[in-house]
């Protein structure tokens, strides 16, 4: 794990279309000083990427403040977490973050192209200090103290292609993990329903894996084994980053989604389960991880 706070080396742009809105959008990523955090800016309104502003969880996670929405932030948030970026302004000229390839991969590649700047200020971690569980019907997320960040998703679908499977991300394995490259998926049977709700207007085989019964419709198939459950880990990580700092703890989600993820992050705060700890005060094992 990184000891010092980070931002990007210089201003950069990312263009694309929104998965749900289908609208063209241009993101401007702007370096931010230490202790700024991640802040979206839309129509002049600054919206911190913090759980207090999380709102609307229709198949994605959105932020809302002072009449302004920024939707489908989770893959970009996961990319920033994977790259240990703590400080960034993200100006957005439409309502939804571009979906790109449906994973965190392209965000990460583009950010690596411009480079990452490290500050002399220590990185601050949100360290889980006690066990905590948030439940909704048969779904739950449980967090346990751990010397490093670990996130597991347990899917339980009644089909053979996803079925009953788990995938885990451990931060020290970030460079070799498949999780950042795992794409959004949906079931062909859902597409009409989503489109009628005004969702998935920008969805295509270029930015989502489409599953029909026990088959993948995309000609290229999956990028790797268990891509859907790995994407659920990516979503969980992006949503957990709404705590405002890199978490240190072991998180396990059984069938969770964006709404439960946000409820869990709120519980971390309400139940005072988090200590904000500078890198120099972290357990040695954590920094090695
Ligand atoms: Zn996703």
Image: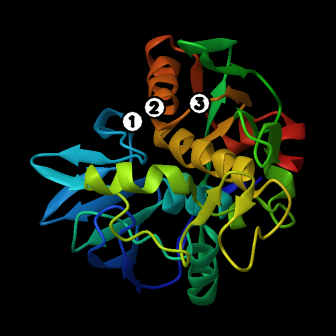
Residue drawn at (32%, 33%) of the image:
52
Residue 256: which disc? 3
According to the picture, the residue beneath numbered tag 1 turns out to be: 51
Indicate the secondary structure of the residue bearing disc 3.
loop
Residue 262: which disc? 2
Q: Position of residue 122 (x, y in %)?
A: 62, 52
Assign ligand 1 to one image quadrant: bottom right
Residue drawn at (90%, 38%) of the image:
285
Residue drawn at (85%, 53%) of the image:
172
Residue 118: which disc? none
Q: Are marks 2 and 1 in contact (CB under 8 Å)?
A: yes
Q: Position of residue 275 (x, y in %)?
A: 59, 24
Q: Which comes before the other along the chain, label 2 or label 1?
A: 1
Q: Are marks 3 and 2 in contact (CB under 8 Å)?
A: no
The CA distance from mark 3 to mark 1 is: 17 Å
Dot 1 crowding, Cα within 10 Å, few <14, some 14–19, many 20+? many
Disc 3 residue: CB within 8 Å of ligand 1: no
State which mark lies toward you, 2 or 1.
2
């Amino acid at each position: 794990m990184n000891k010092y706070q980070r931002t990007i080396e210089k201003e950069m742009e990312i263009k694309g279309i929104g998965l749900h809105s289908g609208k063209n959008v241009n993101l401007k990523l702007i370096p931010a000083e230490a202790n700024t955090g991640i802040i979206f800016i839309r129509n002049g309104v600054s919206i911190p990427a913090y759980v207090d502003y999380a709102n609307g969880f229709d198949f994605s996670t959105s932020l809302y403040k002072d009449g302004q929405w920024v939707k489908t932030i989770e893959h970009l948030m996961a990319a920033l977490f994977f790259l240990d970026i703590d400080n960034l302004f993200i100006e957005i000229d439409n309502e939804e973050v571009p979906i790109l390839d449906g994973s965190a991969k392209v965000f990460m590649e583009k950010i690596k192209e411009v480079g990452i700047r490290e500050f002399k200020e220590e990185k601050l971690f949100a360290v889980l200090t006690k066990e905590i569980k948030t439940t909704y019907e048969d779904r739950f997320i449980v967090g346990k103290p751990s010397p490093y960040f670990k996130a597991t998703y347990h899917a339980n679908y009644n089909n053979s292609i996803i079925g009953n499977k788990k995938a885990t991300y451990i931060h020290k394995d970030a460079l070799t993990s498949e999780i950042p490259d795992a794409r959004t998926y949906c079931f062909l049977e859902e597409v009409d329903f989503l489109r009628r709700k005004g969702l998935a207007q920008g969805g295509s085989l270029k930015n989502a894996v489409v599953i029909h019964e026990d088959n993948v419709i995309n000609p290229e198939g999956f990028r790797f084994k268990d891509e859907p459950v790995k994407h659920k880990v990516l979503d969980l990580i992006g949503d957990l980053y709404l705590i405002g700092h890199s978490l240190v703890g072991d998180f396990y989600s059984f069938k969770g989604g964006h709404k439960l993820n946000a409820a869990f992050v709120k519980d971390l705060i309400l139940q005072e389960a988090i200590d904000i700890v500078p890198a120099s005060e972290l357990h040695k094992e954590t920094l090695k991880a």
